[in-house]
Image (cartoon, helix red, strand yellow):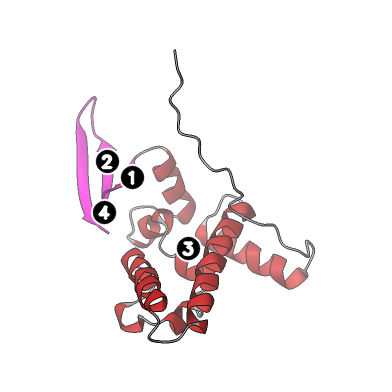
Amino acid sequence: MVNHRVQLVQSKRYSTPRRPFEKPRLDQELKLVGEYGLRNKRELWIVKMFLAKIRKAARELLTLDEKDARRLFQGNALLRRLVRTGVLEEGRMKLDYVLGLKPEDFLERRLQTQVFKLGLAKSIHHARVLIKQGHIRYTHGLFYWCILLSGHQLLVILLRS
């Protein structure tokens, strides 16, 4: 039998800090991990790497001329993607605002944070448990909140994101 798996590109999604024992950074990371209910600092580093790639693309586009076709096309695509994910507001659709984004902006848009902010969970950690156990999941722009009532009855509450 032939294996038809697609070979994915293996690349690291995060990079560790250059100075491992820098006190202010350690305190700030610990605060964010606790506030957003992250499992470990690696999850925070993944968000920081994602933000760094977006900011790098914005910096590169800002060096180009304002009427450059590449800047217009790729810049609008980047801005639309950030607005669609809810990180950037529609009134701030400029590349300059992309440089001002912080990791907290992305952490606010996580499903775990949204479940807690909507009041569906008692704590940020309870929200993580509900998601992990499959009671709440994200599918095609909707939050599905499932509660097992009695036996095999399933109540599904649909919430717009």
* Element type at mark 2: strand
Magenta region, residue range: 135-161
- In the displayed structure, would residue 112 be above or below residue 98? above
Mark 3 or mark 4, earlier in chain: 3
Task: Tell me the crowding category of disc 4: few under 14, some 14 to 19, or many 20 or more residues within 10 angstroms, Cα based.
Answer: few
| Mark 1 vs mark 3, CA separation in Å | 18 Å
Numbered mark located on residue 141 in the image? 4
Numbered mark located on residue 44 in the image? none
- In the displayed structure, would residue 159 be above or below residue 150? below
Residue at (31%, 83%) from the top-left corner?
91
* CB-based contact (under 8 Å), mark 2 and mark 4: no
* Element type at mark 3: helix
* Residue 78: quadrant of the picture: bottom left
Q: Amino acid at mark 3?
A: Leu
Numbered mark located on residue 136 in the image? 1
Q: Nearer the viewer, residue 61 or 144?
A: 61
